[in-house]
Amino acid sequence: MFPFNQRALMSLWSVFFNPDKRYQANADRDAQWNRGAYLAEAMAHCGECHTPRNLAFALNNRRKFAGEVQAGWRAYNITPDHASGVGDWSDADLAHYLSIGHADGRGTAAGPMGEAVDASLKYLAPRTSRRWLPTCARSARSRRRICRRHEPMPRRPHPPISAPPA
């Protein structure tokens, strides 16, 4: 699919958008945050689905973790925003969701997120690794989802069903 089938164009794209660097810990943050950032960025690649893309299909890190539709599935906002993100989730709720793919009263992981839970996230150490990811996600800049182009249309009430004519 053009332009992704053009190696020269992809090489140029990589120069601008793919620094090809290993993860480096942030010295300004504590060890727990750095472990969570490593899991979110280097291992789980949370931003690949939960971060909107720019016009060149690169991650728009100005809206990091703000949510996006990928492959027909909605990857929800995982910033600490209370209205549209996970700001009102407790760390225990997030850790539980990552371990089984379900949070009571919140939702169930399906599609690519369901696969991520089943194939990898549920295997994280419960008392350590699953607690590190929420620490990193909570430190992301709170972003309210602004773009409504992927929002479902509001439901219109059905017309009342009348009795069939006699």
Image (spheres, grey):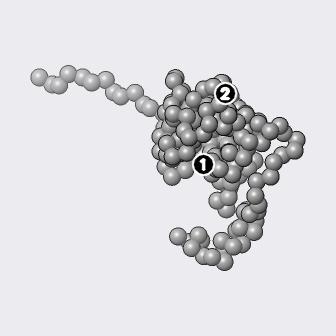
**Residue 116 on image: x %, y %:** 54, 45
Q: Is residue 96 above or below residue 133?
A: above
What type is the residue that disc 2 sits on? Answer: Asp
Q: In which quadrant of the rendered view does residue 93 lie?
A: top right
The structure residue drawn at horizontal position 17% and vertical position 25%, both measured from the top left corner, is 164
Q: In which quadrant of the rendered view does residue 29 lie?
A: top right
Count of numbered marks: 2
Answer left or right for 72 relative to 48: left
Towards the viewer: 157 or 71:
71
Answer left or right for 27 relative to 123: right
Towards the viewer: 76 or 127:
127
Towards the viewer: 151 or 88:
88
Answer left or right for 111 relative to 77: left
Q: Quarter of the image for the C terminus: give it.
A: top left
Q: Is residue 101 above or below residue 166?
A: below
Q: Does residue 52 appear in this view?
A: no
**Residue 135 on image: x %, y %:** 73, 34
| Label at residue 91 | 2
Q: Does residue 153 appear in this view?
A: yes
What type is the residue that disc 1 sits on? Answer: Cys
| Label at residue 49 | 1
State yes or no: discs 2 and 1 in contact (Cβ < 8 Å): no
Looking at marks 2 and 1 on the same chain, the residue that comes earlier in the sequence is marked by 1
The structure residue drawn at horizontal position 66% and vertical position 27%, both measured from the top left corner, is 91
Q: What is the spatial separation of the Cα atoms under label 2 and label 1, in whole angstroms?
A: 21 Å
Mark 1, Cα crowd under 10 Å, few <14 / some 14-19 / many 20+, is many
Secondary structure beneath disc 2? helix
- Of labels 2 and 1, the one closer to you: 2
